[in-house]
């Protein structure tokens, strides 16, 4: 609601304020800097959680990626909602707690994925598969090279492997490759090298 005040020099001063839906006292529609800071911190937290996927890539990325995306959304959506409403301090304490815990879980998930590969001392095994398809989207960085190969796991017909440019160039569609597999310290299998047979 706009209001006018007489200034000492005879001018007019304009101000903006809003009232709560219950007719409570007016408060300024200002941006909540605290919520904005929390939201901005989610960006490096998300990057940290994704970095181990390129260092120790899990064979099946659906579970870790699903957890990372869920945590990011649970933390980001309440913060964005609070920023959009511009009503600092009026959000539910439960949602604030959920958002904070989900945000803290992001780097924790990244740490678990890193330790799953870093602490793994299990003997490596070599799996043989045949290249079905190669995918390299134009304009994407090196981490986006993918190989679709036949699966050695029962109940699955193929595996989608994220590879580097060297491994991508060495693979030939219709030819076999050797995939070095590791059990993972926390039981999440990951692969370290793919080479033509």
Image (cartoon, helix red, strand yellow):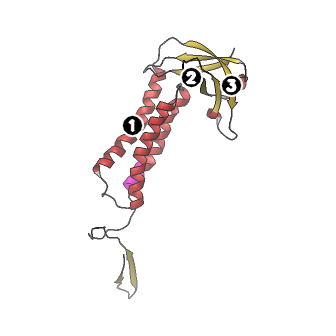
* Residue 84 is inside the magenta segment: no
* Residue 37 is inside the magenta segment: yes
In-front residue for pair 66/181: 66
Q: Name the residue tied to disc 1.
A: 105
Secondary structure category for the residue under label 3: strand
Residue for point 30% across, 52% down: 92
Callout 3 crowding tier (Cα within 10 Å): few <14, some 14–19, many ≥20: some
- In the rendering, at what x and y percent does residue 158 appear? 61, 24
Relative placement, left or right, of 92 versus 118 is left
N-terminal-most mark, 1 or 2: 1
Query: How far separated are the C-alphas under marks 1 and 2?
Result: 31 Å
Q: Name the residue tied to disc 2.
A: 156
- In the rendering, at what x and y percent does residue 26 appear? 30, 70
- In the rendering, at what x and y percent does residue 155 appear? 54, 21
Query: How far separated are the C-alphas under marks 1 and 3?
Result: 36 Å
Location of residue 172 by image quarter: top right
Q: Is 25 located above or below residue 79 in the figure?
A: below
Furthest residue to the bottom?
10
- In the rendering, at what x and y percent does residue 63 appear? 47, 31
Q: Is 43 located above or below residue 154 in the figure?
A: below
**Quadrant location of the C terminus in the rendered image:** top right
**Quadrant location of the N terminus in the rendered image:** bottom left
Q: Which residues are magenta?
A: 28-38
Q: Name the residue tied to disc 3.
A: 132
């Amino acid at each position: 609601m706009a209001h006018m005040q007489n200034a000492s020099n005879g001018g007019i001063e304009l101000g903006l304020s809003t009232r709560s839906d219950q007719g409570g006292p007016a408060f300024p529609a200002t941006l909540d800097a605290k919520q904005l800071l929390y939201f901005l911190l989610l960006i490096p937290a998300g990057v940290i959680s994704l970095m181990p996927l390129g260092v120790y890539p899990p064979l099946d990325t659906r579970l870790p990626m699903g957890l990372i995306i869920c945590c990011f959304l649970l933390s980001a959506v309440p913060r964005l909602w609070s920023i959009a409403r511009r009503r600092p301090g009026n959000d539910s304490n439960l949602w604030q707690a959920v958002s904070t815990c989900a945000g803290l879980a992001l780097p924790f998930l990244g740490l678990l994925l890193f330790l799953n590969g870093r602490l793994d001392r299990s003997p490596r095994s070599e799996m043989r598969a045949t290249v079905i398809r190669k995918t390299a989207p134009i304009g994407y960085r090196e981490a986006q090279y993918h190989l679709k190969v036949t699966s050695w796991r029962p109940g699955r017909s193929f595996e989608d492997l994220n590879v580097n440019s060297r491994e991508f160039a060495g693979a030939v569609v219709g030819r076999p490759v050797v995939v070095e597999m590791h059990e993972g310290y926390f039981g999440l299998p990951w692969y370290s090298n793919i080479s033509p047979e």
